[in-house]
Image (cartoon, coloured by chain):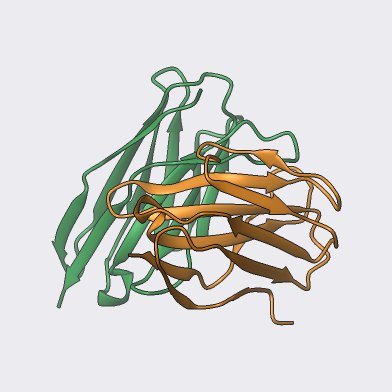
Amino acid sequence: GENVEQHPSTLSVQEGDSAVIKCTYSDSASNYFPWYKQELGKRPQLIIDIRSNVGEKKDQRIAVTLNKTAKHFSLHITETQPEDSAVYFCAASIDTGFQKLVFGTGTRLLVSP
Amino acid sequence: NAGVTQTPKFRVLKTGQSMTLLCAQDMNHEYMYWYRQDPGMGLRLIHYSVGEGTTAKGEVPDGYNVSRLKKQNFLLGLESAAPSQTSVYFCASSPGLTYNEQFFGPGTRLTVL
């Protein structure tokens, strides 16, 4: 089955710096890669996703890149702010309507003022 | 709309006791999921449902049962709780179309003593 590895497990940056979180997946049939943000004590919420027919997607300060050949994808956050502090999860699935998501183990991002 | 709700929010059980966690969604979503979240292990799929009256096993189904008698509700049962089932449980739902966001509930924190 699918296996998703996520690095780093923790990431500390200064406000205004960029942050990059990387994930690798094992199943070449996976075609959908969402990223979820979970603030302390809250539920996970989708922040951005990418499909396998796209190499990069941006939404304001966040972007995701996908390298299908290498089977890895990354989350990029620019101009980080304290409110970006949270745990970020990557996931992968073979999406045919139903998503059987396999999640990474999470990255705790701390943005210091 | 309330979105996805879960009851109870917290529960403490003794080993061997049973309980049912209730998930409800008011978005008319076809698909529903139960995950558990443990420190350092991300979110893992327990069971899922692709429609009223259907259920299927996920990644970690042992020790759990589920039922989806009504489209809006998805119940997770623990017949004989074990300390290894101490976790935070999240329910999620999605519309049933391709590449759709999963909407998560607020979570249930379960401790088994």
Above or below: residue B35 compared with residue B12: above
Above or below: residue B89 compared with residue A40: above
* Residue B92 at least partly seen: yes
Q: Residue at x 40, y 66 (%)?
A: B14
Q: Report whether B41 appears left or right of B91.
A: left
Quadrant where the N terminus of chain B is found in the figure:
bottom right
Of B2 and B82, nearer the camera is: B82
The colour with which the image depicts chain B is orange
Q: Residue at x 27, y 65 (%)?
A: A79
* Residue A45 at least partly seen: no
Of B23 and A32, nearer the camera is: B23
Q: Report whether B46 appears left or right of B42.
A: right
**Chain identifier matching the green colour in the rendered picture:** A
Q: Residue at x 57, y 27 (%)?
A: A30
Q: Position of residue B67 (x, y in %)?
A: 75, 54
Of B79 and A74, nearer the camera is: B79
Of B57 and B11, nearer the camera is: B11
Quadrant where the C terminus of chain B is found in the figure:
bottom left
